[in-house]
Image (spheres, rainbow, N blue to C red):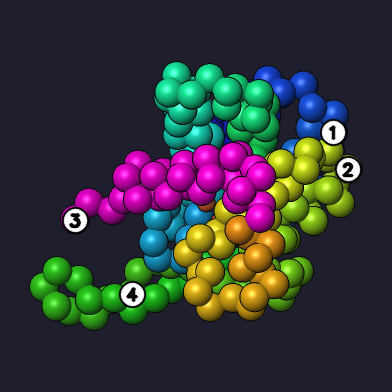
Amino acid sequence: MDYKKEFIEHLKTTNRQGIDDLVTELEDMGFFKAPASTKFHLNEEEGLVKHSLNVCKAALNIRKSMIELDDTLLEELPKDSVIIASLLHDTCKADIYKPTMKKEKNRFGTWCEVPGYDVDYSNFPLGHGEKSVIVLLRSGFELTDDEIMAIRWHMNAWDLPFQSYDIKSNFNKAKEICPLLSLVQAADCLASNLLERKVE
Ligand SMILES: [Fe+2]
Ligand SMILES: [Fe+2]
């Protein structure tokens, strides 16, 4: 399966300006080879592009189901925005994982060395969703306000209790005015926890 080709094909269906430059930027950052995590979902070469495609497919299915339940969502969830926000939400991860060898107990209880990844934020330490948005805009790619909010805040449901009052207020307002944010969060969660779960 050529995941990079599939990713670009999905992106090109949107006809958004700047896709070729964006793909070059993603390539330079290592997006198409990077894993999706150090030791959780898809911690393998090309894990990030596979995860992005899974989130996109889950998001398109959720969009369809939600519009069937409430057709007023059609206007607020344009297909192009769903594709763009879900494919690009984790752009920030493209350059943070470094291959390494890790010690791990095998099923017989013996320690052995297995290939894994360490995380290193030193290239551009801006955070998670914030970094994704900035890297995308810096490449010249245009994002709508809803796409920016959905990408910026896609992780914040999970660590919200530990955030400042300002962050919580901004997140809550974005969630209220931007249905795309809830959709990307749900798709990210379902792709990671259901489609990409590790089966022992
Ligand atoms: Fe993320
Ligand atoms: Fe993700």
Front-most of residues 18 and 128: 128
| Residue 174 part of the magenta segment | yes
Front-most of residues 42 and 17: 17
Callout 2: SS: loop
State the separation of the CA atoms marked 4 and 3. 19 Å
| Residue 153 part of the magenta segment | no
Q: Mark 4 and 3 residues: CB-CB less than 8 Å, in contact? A: no
> Is residue 94 among the parts visible in the rendering?
no
Residue 140 found in image quarter: top right
State the separation of the CA atoms marked 2 and 3. 43 Å
Callout 3: SS: loop
Where residue 113 is drawn, which disc sits there?
4
- Amino acid of disc 1: Gly
Q: Horizontal and vertical percent for residue 2?
A: 53, 30
| Residue picked out by circle 1 | 18
Q: What residue range appears in magenta? A: 173-200
Q: Horizontal and vertical percent for residue 22?
A: 79, 40
- Amino acid of disc 3: Glu
Q: Horizontal and vertical percent for residue 100?
A: 49, 72
Callout 4: SS: strand
State the separation of the CA atoms marked 2 and 4. 42 Å
Mark 2 or 4, nearer chain start: 4
Q: Mainly helix, strand or loop, the magenta region?
A: helix
